[in-house]
């Protein structure tokens, strides 16, 4: 972002960066940066809080009054990532003949559909449609139990895209199933990897691939790095 | 160390290009300026082409579109908030608010999305796709760009 700021400024457009990594803003020194120590993935800080977002924008646009740069100002509020898993009930076991994650994903299908109809968009679709999620989890279940990942039938043959679609399916469904304030920075991730059968299956398949000697980028980016 | 702390610590060590003679634009008054958003969240409108891993290209997002898809390939940041409220990454409704109240002059007719996870030297974005994107926004009469990172 800070690199692009220099590029746009050189083209004659005044730029303001909402910085998320302070050291990078110092090193690249874009003309104007407001550093926001907010959860990554939330540069405006708080979802569904127009007042807070307008405060961020107001402080950002105020930097246009500087007569010379680089200008680097810190937003006064720090928002920590929330490490409490989202409280979201999961469907009960329905068909015990299926792997738990496959059964679970089928049980979330209606919630996912409600999300799709309400939002009019979905981030599932990189290598599968929503109806392919249970099958993809069945493949990961087999890999976790020793099947060769390269020939197990992963959608698109792509581990990272497969896990993207599964996680987005779960997140979109979960947001239909919870009330209350918006979950904090890592709450959804913690819920998925620590409380869902799908998350456990992804982690187990990833570990099995690592142990079987799969190349680093193929298994590592199936989950956040700290997992 | 939680995921955000780990990613920030890692990002802080990445090599960064230097700009020894940076450009500086003296902007006209904000109330007369057309403002565009440029995000690195790899968002794109439903039906448009998605992003590949390490994609150095960009997508336009029409001012009217809210049916956006997450095209980012990194699993290392929160993707729940933007599903609840696009504005936490792409503050298009807030710009509309500010235009309606006269704080900014106008909302640009189209906005830009890049993919945030890039090769370390960011050479293509710096020398090719970035300048092309900037020229397109200049063509649209954009005076000010707000860059939002993911």
Image: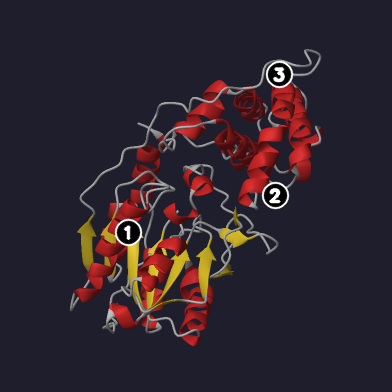
Of the image marks 2 and 3, the number of the one nearer the N terminus: 3
Kindly report which numbered mark, 2 or 1, lies closer to the viewer in this rendering: 1
Q: Secondary structure at mark 3?
A: helix
Q: Position of residue A74 (x, y in %)?
A: 22, 55
Q: How many marks?
A: 3
Q: Position of residue A226 (x, y in %)?
A: 46, 32
Residue neighbourhood size for the residue with mark 2, other residues' Cα within 10 Å, grouped as few (<14), some (14–19), many (≥20): many
Q: Position of residue B4 (x, y in %)?
A: 38, 40
**Lateral position of residue A176 relative to residue A44, left or right:** right
Residue placed at 60% from the left, 23% from the top? A196
- Above or below A65: residue B40: above
Q: Quadrant of the N terminus of chain B?
A: top left
Q: Secondary structure at mark 2?
A: loop
Residue neighbourhood size for the residue with mark 3, other residues' Cα within 10 Å, grouped as few (<14), some (14–19), many (≥20): many
Q: Which residue is mark 2?
A: A126
Q: Which residue is mark 1?
A: A54
Give the Cα distance between marks 3 and 1: 44 Å
Labels 2 and 3 in the same subunit: yes
Give the Cα distance between marks 2 and 1: 33 Å
Of the image marks 3 and 1, the number of the one nearer the N terminus: 1
The residue most toward the front is B101
Q: Is residue A160 visible?
A: no
Residue neighbourhood size for the residue with mark 1, other residues' Cα within 10 Å, grouped as few (<14), some (14–19), many (≥20): some
Q: Secondary structure at mark 1?
A: helix
**Lateral position of residue A116 relative to residue B13, left or right:** right
Q: Position of residue A101 (x, y in %)?
A: 69, 23
Mark 1 belongs to chain: A
**Lateral position of residue B65 relative to residue B86, left or right:** right
Figure colour scheme: secondary structure
Q: Which residue is mark 3?
A: A100
**Lateral position of residue A124 relative to residue B118, left or right:** right
Any mark on residue A16, and which? Answer: none
């Amino acid at each position: 972002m800070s690199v692009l700021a220099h590029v746009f400024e050189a083209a004659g457009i005044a730029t303001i960066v909402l910085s998320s990594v302070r050291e990078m803003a110092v090193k690249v020194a874009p003309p104007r940066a407001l550093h926001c120590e907010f959860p990554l993935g939330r540069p405006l800080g708080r979802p569904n809080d127009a007042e807070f977002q307008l405060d961020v924008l107001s402080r950002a646009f105020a930097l246009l009054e500087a007569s010379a740069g680089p200008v680097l100002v810190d937003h006064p509020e720090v928002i920590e990532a929330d490490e409490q898993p989202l409280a979201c009930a999961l469907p009960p076991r329905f068909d015990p003949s299926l792997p738990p994650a496959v059964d679970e994903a089928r049980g979330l299908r209606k919630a996912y559909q409600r999300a799709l109809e309400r939002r009019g968009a979905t981030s599932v679709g990189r290598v599968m449609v929503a109806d392919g999620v249970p099958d993809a989890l069945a493949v990961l279940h087999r890999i976790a139990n020793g099947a060769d990942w390269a020939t197990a039938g992963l959608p698109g043959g792509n581990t990272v895209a497969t896990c993207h679609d599964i996680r987005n399916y779960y997140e979109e469904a979960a947001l239909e199933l919870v009330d209350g304030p918006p979950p904090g920075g890592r709450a959804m991730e913690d819920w998925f990897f620590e409380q869902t059968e799908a998350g456990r299956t992804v982690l187990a398949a990833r570990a099995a691939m690592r142990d079987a000697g799969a190349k680093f980028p193929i298994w590592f980016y199936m989950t956040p790095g700290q997992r | 160390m939680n995921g955000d702390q780990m990613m920030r610590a890692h990002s802080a060590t990445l090599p960064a290009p230097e700009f020894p003679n940076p450009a500086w634009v003296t902007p006209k008054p904000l109330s007369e300026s057309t403002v565009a958003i440029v995000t690195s969240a790899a968002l794109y409108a439903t039906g448009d082409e998605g992003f590949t891993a390490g994609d150095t290209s960009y997508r336009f997002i029409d001012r009217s579109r809210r049916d956006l898809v997450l095209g980012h390939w990194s699993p290392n940041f929160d993707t729940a908030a933007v599903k609840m409220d696009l504005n936490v990454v792409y503050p298009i409704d807030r710009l509309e608010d500010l235009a309606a109240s006269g704080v900014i002059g106008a909302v640009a007719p189209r906005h830009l999305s890049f993919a945030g996870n890039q090769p370390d030297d960011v050479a293509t974005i710096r020398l090719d796709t970035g300048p092309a994107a900037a020229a397109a926004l200049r063509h649209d009469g954009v005076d000010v760009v707000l860059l939002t990172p993911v």
